[in-house]
């Protein structure tokens, strides 16, 4: 996998659907963005990690600066997920050629 460095280790619950949510301190201040959990059991119990808010701000500023000319000033442009659609033949080959077999 990819290394994610400089994260905050947390015992906050990180479950499917709430990664990407805020990690707050006891005063309600944003500390980071919940990102991942390491679990030896495969369940949602384990060690959680969050990206520090300063790193999130730097990344958001870079995205806004990069996309600003294509959109209204100070507003991010359209995003993308970096996905490609595979040709039918490749899809079938990856699926084991099960299509059309009886």
Image (cartoon, rainbow, N blue to C red):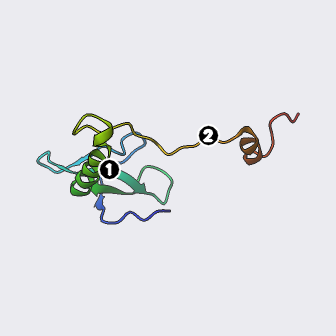
| Residue denoted by label 2 | 85
Where does the image place residue 38, in percent across and percent down from the top left?
43, 59
Check disc 2 and report its element: helix, strand or loop. loop
Which quadrant would residue 101 be assigned to in this image? top right
- Image point (70%, 40%), residue name: 87
Q: Nearer the viewer, mark 1 or mark 2?
A: 2
Between 71 and 54, the one lying in front of the other is 71
Which quadrant would residue 64 be assigned to in this image? top left
Left or right relative to 46: residue 11: left
- Image point (25%, 37%), residue name: 75
Q: Dot 2: within a 10 Å radius of its alpha carbon, few (fewer than 14), some, or many (20 or more) residues?
A: few
Q: Dot 1: within a 10 Å radius of its alpha carbon, few (fewer than 14), some, or many (20 or more) residues?
A: many
Where does the image place residue 90, in percent across and percent down from the top left?
73, 45
Which quadrant would residue 71 be assigned to in this image? top left
Image position of 24 with respect to 7: above or below: above
| Residue denoted by label 1 | 34
């Amino acid at each position: 996998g990819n290394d994610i460095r400089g994260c905050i280790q947390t015992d906050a619950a990180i479950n499917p659907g709430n990664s990407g949510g805020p990690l707050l301190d006891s005063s309600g201040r944003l500390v980071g963005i919940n990102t991942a959990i390491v679990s030896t059991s495969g369940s949602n119990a384990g060690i959680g990690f969050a990206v520090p808010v300063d790193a999130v701000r730097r990344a958001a500023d870079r995205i806004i600066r990069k996309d600003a000319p294509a959109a209204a000033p100070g507003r991010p442009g359209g995003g993308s997920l970096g996905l490609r659609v595979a040709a039918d033949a490749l899809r079938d080959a990856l699926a084991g050629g099960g299509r059309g077999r009886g």
